[in-house]
Amino acid sequence: MHLDVQDLRNFYYRSALGRAAQKSLRDRMLEVWPEAKGQTVVGFGFAAPLLRPYLKDARRVITLMPGPQGVMPWPAGMPNTSVLTEETLWPLETGHVDKLVLLHGLETCERQADLLEECWRVLGPGGKALFIVPNRAGLWARRDRTPFGYGRPYSPGQLDAQLRKHQFLPERQVGALYQFPSGQRMWMKSAGLFESVGRNVSTIMAGGAFMVEATKLVYPPKGTVQRKRARMSIGVMEPQAKPV
């Protein structure tokens, strides 16, 4: 079940805890993908809070928001890039996306297999996707006061197996959201300390979410290639030879 776009906007843009979560996720994403110059970057779900750093140099930035969630215009003060779309039928050409970011998209989708197939379709050869999901072992997945308390949380092994099943090669895992999921002043003041310490902890022991960078795999055709000799063409319209 998708959250309403108004609830997501209020959390990430109008609450102190949401702004801190936005910063944590964005900083970790930029460690994985520091730039996207000349590339097509697409976000699905509610990835808009993370994509602003790519607006300057990317060839194109598109934010896809699923119908059950709803859509909002983004970015503020600039030409809109948001599109309301079906969960598993995106208005994008096949193989034209260089970087794909999913936030609050996979864990809340009821047709996850179809969604992963659509992700694979739009990515170009060698294209990369960043799947951001709630950590099953983290505290954020246990509190429904944040968007990470909804949908299906994952362990790193579960997400890894699901991506491999749909022709993705997981390459890197990064943890995020190490601070306590509370907006109280005491916990907000210590958020920076928790984040700095948590980055040296194993992904399995991560906080509220983790990211998996995966590459699209394109397998060659199976079987043995057989070579056939081309037959000599017959000149049907050529003039006949004159008798001697």
Image (spheres, grey):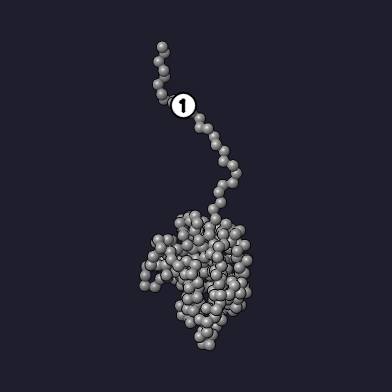
Tell me the amino acid under the disc marked 1.
Ile
Q: Is residue 124 above or below residue 10?
A: above
For the C terminus, which image quadrant?
top left
Q: Residues within 10 Å of mark 1 (few under 14, many from 20)?
A: few
In which quadrant of the rendered view does residue 206 lie?
bottom right
- Front-most of 47 and 55? 55
Q: Residue at x 40, y 61 (%)?
A: 38
- The picture places residue 89, in percent across and down from the top left corner, at 51, 59
- The picture places residue 84, in percent across and down from the top left corner, at 46, 65
- Front-most of 113 and 165? 165
Q: Residue at x 44, y 25 (%)?
A: 236
For the N terminus, which image quadrant?
bottom right
> For the view shown, which residue lies furthest in the front direction?
200
Q: Residue at x 61, y 62 (%)?
A: 162
| Count of numbered labels shown in the rendering | 1
Residue 233 appears in the rendering: yes
Q: Secondary structure at mark 1?
A: loop
Q: Residue at x 55, y 65 (%)?
A: 172
> For the view shown, which residue lies furthest in the top direction?
244
In this rendering, position of residue 160 left or right of residue 10: right
Q: Is residue 207 above or below residue 166?
A: below
Q: Is residue 110 above or below residue 200?
A: above
> For the view shown, which residue lies furthest in the bottom direction?
186
Residue 146 appears in the rendering: no
In which quadrant of the rendered view does residue 74 lie?
bottom left
- Front-most of 152 and 196? 196
- The picture places residue 69, in percent across and down from the top left corner, at 51, 70
- The picture places residue 81, in percent across and down from the top left corner, at 41, 66
Provide the residue designation for mark 1: 234
